[in-house]
Image (cartoon, rainbow, N blue to C red):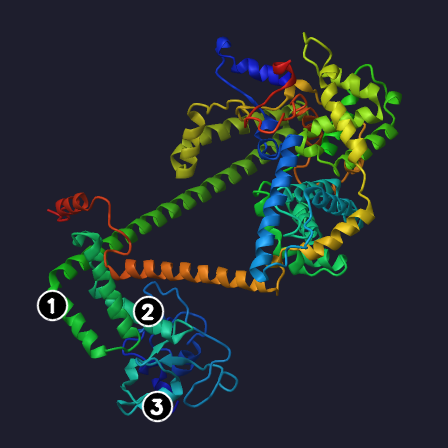
């Protein structure tokens, strides 16, 4: 806060500001955006997002735990995070650490001014965890294929998780660091190999993305050009019509018809020449349209082995029925649930009326189970 | 007729590949809730006798000699009490304005419940409330328990809910019931397709009388013996024999020996007899007498607070405790004995071989 001129620079040696390197302190301060990403000023230790798209964490009721200033008096307040995961505002950092390393006011761990990064996550424990995991992932990058069987892979994963847990929750840090070191020494070659492989993969992905983006751009360009051409042609056609109407002696209708035919010819000619510029989607569609028509067999209702007494009654379209009067007269369908059809209710009633009509009641004390005597078979 | 067609298809001589079973024969009402009158009587008496002996033993265990002078109910008296509560269901449904299906379903549930349990164990009052509530749910006309119990005086929600699982279990979880009133509606609609029946031959009051008979039939055992279509036809025959005969004849298959109505006559006759003789509410005085005696011969095990009930509870808890311990023991054994808690892979050796053969080098 004391020396304004240094504000832009003290955060980092290699500041890359969007407004140019020679921006003065005032604008440098104002260009410290509150919502925009400042990930270009980050350095390792904090959570860095390489693509620069994540925004810094921001909340209206931020307060510096050391000096208790908040955004009310100081709208450009910015809280940075130390390597021991404590938050402080820039002015406090400046005050405490300008003269060299000093103990953190909260936990007394000795810190340098460089060790402060902007915050990405609302919750600092999350921030710490993400940083730890990122570090571990760089070292412990073995994959399933590097192991003989699933059991040893799972054991490896469990050990990795164990180490991560210890680091995050400050459990046995010295011992854990020793374990990490031991692992690194043992598997140096394999780690190297795997990291290279990952790099290559990331590279390939990026290249593919680039390619696609370029293609899209090109297509957009072509489309725009085409539209231009069309527009011009339409204008000229219109002008021609007007001219011809002025000059020629034929009837107006015939003139317009003739010019329209010409316009059609022109557009069809154009469309055949611009086949090259079809996008992938259009290509697919064209191919599908050209291919054989998919057969559409008529719907076959469910076939099962149940006899539903269909031959015993015929359902009519209309019945004089007092139960369904209200529902049928209801024009707007207020009373009906979706999918309700009176015909189905009638059908059910009719089926009920003839179901089992000829079943004899069970006779005697111990009729054989499953006996279905009906009148006809027994008579 | 219909079954004849089905039977024909089953005839091996015709070499037909599909045997179609009539739809009604797939229903649980046909499969498990269909009895003959003799069977019904036997079930009820045997149930009653067994219950009496069990309760007698409980009495004796409690206080030897106390059961000598207790007059237990017999099957007919139980029947009477159940019938009274069956007649209360339509009153309740009218109060709540439930559709007829709810009423019919609840009555069916109550009847079936007392084919598996005895009145001395479970008093029909709460069972009736539970069956009605259950019926509203199974017929897709649900109401909340709150509004149900608040509309019936002196009922709490536990009265209804405590018995719900027991009722469902006694029904064997078979909740779908085919009803005679729907069959009657179907017959009424179908009458309009008959060519020789004109509008004035089927006045509305014929239907009203017929539906009254159907409602009376619900107080009887008719639905446990006959199919709903038969009951409906019998009710119509009581209201208008001519219409019933015409309709039944139209359903006959060509080439039958006699008109269909004649073949159905014995069945319809017995149903008509049942409806007219037993289709009215029981005598209130007699029922009151039965109820008074019931208070004395109730099964003490089911009465919360009595000695037998508490003893039963203790026994149950002990059994549950044993089960829990056994389970804990099993789990402990599985964990401590080692081995992969996720189980082993099926073909471990093959997998290992495949992995060893994988060559990831770029050369």
Cα separation, mark 1 vs mark 3, equals 37 Å
Residue hosting label 3: A105
Q: Position of residue A86 (x, y in %)?
A: 36, 82
Any mark on residue A185, and which?
1
Alpha-carbon neighbours of circle 3 within 10 Å: few (<14), some, or many (≥20)?
some
Q: Closest to the observer: A139 or B363?
A: A139
Disc 2 sits on a residue from what chain?
A
> In screen coordinates, is B95 left or right of A290?
right
Q: Closest to the observer: A14 or A374?
A: A374
| Disc nearer the start of the sequence (1/3) | 3
| Disc nearer the start of the sequence (3/2) | 3
Q: Is residue A12 above or below residue B94?
A: below
Q: What element carries label 1?
A: helix
Q: Is mark 3 on a helix, strand or loop?
A: loop
Q: In this view, does A47 lie above or below A200?
A: below
Residue hosting label 2: A130
Q: Position of residue A3 (x, y in %)?
A: 36, 90
| Disc nearer the start of the sequence (1/2) | 2
Q: Where is residue B233 in the image (x, y as percent from the top left)?
A: 75, 25
* Quadrant into which the C terminus of chain A falls: top right
Q: Do badges 1 and 3 share one subunit?
A: yes
Any mark on residue B22, and which?
none
Q: Closest to the observer: A297 or B150?
A: B150
Disc 3 sits on a residue from what chain?
A
């Amino acid at each position: 806060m004391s020396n304004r001129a240094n504000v832009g620079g003290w955060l980092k040696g290699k500041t890359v500001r969007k407004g140019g390197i020679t921006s003065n302190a005032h604008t440098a301060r104002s260009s410290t955006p509150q919502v925009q990403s400042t990930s270009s000023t980050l350095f390792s230790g904090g959570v860095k997002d390489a693509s620069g798209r994540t925004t810094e964490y921001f909340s209206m009721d931020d307060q510096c735990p050391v000096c208790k200033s908040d955004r009310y008096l100081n709208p450009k307040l910015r809280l940075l995070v130390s390597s021991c995961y404590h938050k402080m505002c820039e002015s406090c950092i400046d005050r405490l650490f300008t003269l060299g390393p000093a103990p953190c006011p909260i936990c007394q761990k000795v810190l340098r001014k460089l060790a402060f990064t902007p915050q990405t996550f609302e919750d600092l424990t999350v921030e710490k965890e993400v940083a730890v995991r990122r570090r571990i992932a760089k070292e412990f990058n073995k994959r399933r294929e590097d192991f003989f069987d699933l059991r040893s892979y799972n054991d490896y994963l469990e050990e990795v998780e164990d180490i991560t847990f210890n680091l995050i929750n400050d459990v046995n840090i010295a011992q854990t660091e020793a374990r990490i070191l031991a692992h690194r020494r043992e598997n140096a070659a394999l780690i190297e190999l795997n990291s290279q492989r990952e790099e290559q993969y990331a590279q390939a992905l990026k290249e593919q993305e680039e390619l696609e983006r370029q293609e899209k751009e090109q297509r957009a360009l072509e489309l725009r050009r085409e539209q231009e051409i069309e527009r011009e042609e339409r204008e000229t056609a219109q002008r021609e019509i007007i001219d011809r109407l002025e000059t020629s002696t034929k009837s107006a209708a015939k003139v317009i018809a003739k010019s329209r035919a010409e316009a059609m010819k022109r557009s069809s000619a154009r469309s055949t020449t611009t086949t090259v510029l079809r996008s992938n989607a259009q290509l697919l569609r064209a191919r599908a349209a050209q291919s054989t028509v998919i057969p559409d067999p008529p719907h076959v209702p469910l076939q099962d082995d149940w006899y539903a007494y269909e031959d015993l009654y015929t359902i009519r379209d209309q019945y004089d029925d007092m139960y369904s009067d209200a529902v049928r007269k209801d024009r707007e369908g207020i009373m009906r649930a979706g999918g309700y059809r009176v015909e189905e209710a009638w059908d059910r009633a009719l089926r009920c009326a003839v179901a089992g009509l000829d079943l004899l009641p069970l006779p005697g004390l111990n009729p054989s189970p499953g006996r279905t005597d009906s009148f006809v078979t027994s008579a | 007729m219909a079954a004849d067609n089905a039977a024909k298809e089953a005839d091996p001589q015709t070499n037909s590949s599909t045997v179609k079973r009539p739809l009604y024969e797939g229903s649980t009402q046909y499969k498990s809730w269909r009895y003959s009158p003799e069977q019904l009587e036997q079930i009820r008496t045997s149930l009653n006798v067994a219950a009496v002996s069990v309760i007698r033993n409980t009495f004796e265990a409690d206080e030897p000699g106390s059961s000598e002078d207790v007059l237990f109910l017999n099957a007919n008296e139980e029947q009477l009490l159940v019938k009274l509560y069956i007649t209360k269901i339509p009153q309740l449904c009218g109060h709540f304005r439930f559709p007829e299906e709810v009423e019919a379903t609840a009555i069916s549930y109550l009847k079936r419940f007392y084919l598996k349990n005895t009145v001395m164990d479970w008093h029909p009052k709460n069972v009736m409330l539970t069956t009605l509530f259950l019926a509203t749910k199974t017929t897709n006309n649900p109401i909340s328990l709150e509004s149900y119990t608040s509309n019936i005086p002196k009922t709490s929600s536990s009265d209804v809910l405590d018995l719900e699982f027991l009722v469902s279990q006694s029904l064997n979880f078979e909740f779908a019931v085919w009803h005679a009133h729907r069959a009657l509606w179907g017959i009424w609609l179908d009458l309009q397709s008959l060519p020789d029946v004109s509008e004035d031959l089927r006045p509305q009051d014929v239907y009203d009388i017929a539906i009254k008979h159907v409602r009376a039939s619900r107080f009887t055992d008719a639905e446990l013996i006959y199919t709903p279509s038969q009951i409906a036809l019998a009710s119509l025959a009581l209201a208008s024999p001519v219409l019933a005969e015409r309709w039944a004849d139209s359903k006959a298959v060509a080439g039958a020996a006699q008109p269909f109505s004649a073949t159905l006559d014995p069945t319809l006759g017995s149903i008509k007899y049942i409806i007219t003789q037993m289709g009215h509410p029981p005598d209130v005085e007699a029922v009151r007498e039965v109820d008074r005696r019931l208070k004395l011969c109730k099964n003490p095990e089911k009465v919360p607070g009595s000695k037998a009930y508490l003893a039963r509870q203790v026994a149950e808890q002990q059994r549950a405790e044993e089960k829990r311990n056994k389970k804990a023991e099993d789990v402990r054994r599985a964990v401590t004995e080692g081995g992969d808690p996720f189980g082993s892979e099926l073909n471990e050796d093959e997998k290992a071989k495949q992995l060893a053969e994988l060559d990831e080098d770029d050369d």
